[in-house]
Amino acid sequence: MSRSALKDDVFLRMALELSRLGTCCRLKVGCVLLRADGGLASGGYNGALPGMAHCTPETCGPGMRCLHTSHAEENALGFCDGAVHTAYVTDEPCLTCTRALVRRGVRRVVFLRPYASIAEQERAEREGILAHFGVSWEHLDLHGQPTA
Ligand SMILES: [Zn+2]
Ligand SMILES: [Zn+2]
């Protein structure tokens, strides 16, 4: 494995570890952010606001969109200042998080699981942003580990 492939593997695994702290019962998401110099900028997971109730199968069942958590990307961005360059996320970012990441300078997004149920309109909007800013959008499997 090349050095750059090893780094992708390590940071994606870190995001996967962080996702274990997610408070949504349907989907646990982790995110690791790197600065342009490759230094670790921040990490986060999807979570309810401090002290608020966690998700339940009633609020976040299969096919339902979670409305109770701040997304992992949003939290990771909130825990650091300044520009970031690369985002490793367990799950393909939504449109809102894509905008937030791009605003902070992200030019490369690496994710483990594609988000299949995204609406066509949302997907098109996201594609437009990625093309405009030249963001590299990469679906990556962990070495030796099947993706969900
Ligand atoms: Zn939830
Ligand atoms: Zn999001």
Image (cartoon, rainbow, N blue to C red):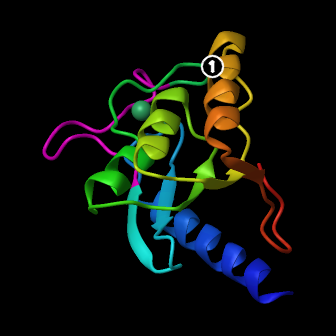
Q: Quadrant of residue 76?
A: bottom left
Horizontal side of residue 115 vs 96, given as left or right: right
Of residues 54 and 70, the one nearer the viewer is 70
Q: Main secondary structure of the magenta part?
A: loop
| Residue picked out by circle 1 | 125
Which residues are drawn in magenta?
A: 45-60
Of residues 105 and 110, the one nearer the viewer is 105
Give the farthest residue toward the top: 121
Q: Residue at x 40, y 22 (%)?
A: 59
Q: Position of residue 117 (x, y in %)?
A: 70, 22
Of residues 109 and 94, the one nearer the viewer is 109
Q: Is residue 136 above or below residue 17?
A: above
Q: Residue at x 55, y 32 (%)?
A: 94
Q: Is residue 31 above or below residue 120?
A: below
Q: Residue at x 83, y 74 (%)?
A: 143
Quarter the N terminus occupies: bottom right
Q: Can you see residue 118?
A: no
Amino acid on which disc 1 is placed: Glu
Of residues 31 and 35, the one nearer the viewer is 35
| SS label for mark 1 | helix
Q: Quadrant of residue 88?
A: bottom right
Does the magenta segment cover residue 58?
yes
Q: Position of residue 61 (x, y in %)?
A: 53, 24
